Image (spheres, grey):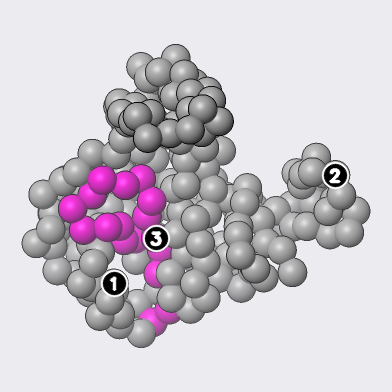
Amino acid sequence: VGEVTSKVYMDVLIQGVNSASKNTRGSNLDKQAAGAGRIVVGLYGKEAPETAAMFEQLFAGTLPAKCQEVDFSAATAREELQKKQPVKQCKAAEKKPVNLEDSSVFSIEKDSIISFGRLKGKFMLREAPSNGDEGARLSHDRKGLLSTRRGGGTFVFGITAGDKDSEELDANSVVFGEVLEGMDLVDKLNNTPVKAYVAGLGEGSK
């Protein structure tokens, strides 16, 4: 078990989709909210110091991150046109620190891990910093642990949703914190019906 050295939180909205909203391109999603609340997490600043520090800034909305360099040399004219707008949008807001506002769940692997932090809009092309926490060795052996890719380079992080130890997660990911409050929301997300995607931070589709 790691030692909690700081606390941060994120507000989560789980949006429901029903027959009334399926044909409205999401305009009614806020009205169809199936659950909302706050998840408070404790960060392990001793066991994974660089990872914890980066995510503390991300949660607080104070993380500086430059735009990725996009190579247009092999792109078709159509692909270049499609890519230029996000690049322009990123550059225009590059001085603004990255935060999780309007981010979404990346995936839900029931009873395993729920992945957060898929950035959209002006933050979509930001470059996440790497870190030196590759040697951190806490196990993914219970629900409510925060985890991210070993070595950093991503804004995506997961919260474990099962109690079984995962050798695959232990090998590829670093545990850098735990949920202190809001496990009911984690459980609700874990049981959210999904198909091939999750949008709007937890929107499920039957």
Query: Marks 3 and 1: in contact by CB < 8 Å?
Result: no
Q: Would you name the residue on which mark 1 appears?
A: 169
Q: Which residues are magenta?
A: 146-163
- Horizontal arrangement in the rendering, residue 124 relative to residue 201 (left or right): left
Q: Amino acid at mark 2?
A: Thr
Residue 24's tag is 2
Q: Amino acid at mark 3?
A: Gly
Q: Would you name the residue on which mark 3 appears?
A: 158
Helix, strand or loop for disc 2: loop
- Nearest to N terminus: mark 2 or mark 3: 2
Task: Indicate the quadrant where residue 74 lies.
Answer: top left
Label 1 CA crowd tier, 10 Å (few <14, some 14–19, many 20+): many
Cα–Cα gap, marks 1 and 2: 38 Å
Residue 182 coordinates in the image, percent (x, y): 51, 60
**Residue 127 visible in the picture:** yes
Q: Could you say which is closer to the camera, residue 160 or residue 204?
A: 204
Q: Give the mark toward the camera: 2 or 3.
A: 2
Residue 112 coordinates in the image, percent (x, y): 43, 76
Q: Could you say which is closer to the camera, residue 73 or residue 128?
A: 73
Q: Amino acid at mark 1?
A: Leu
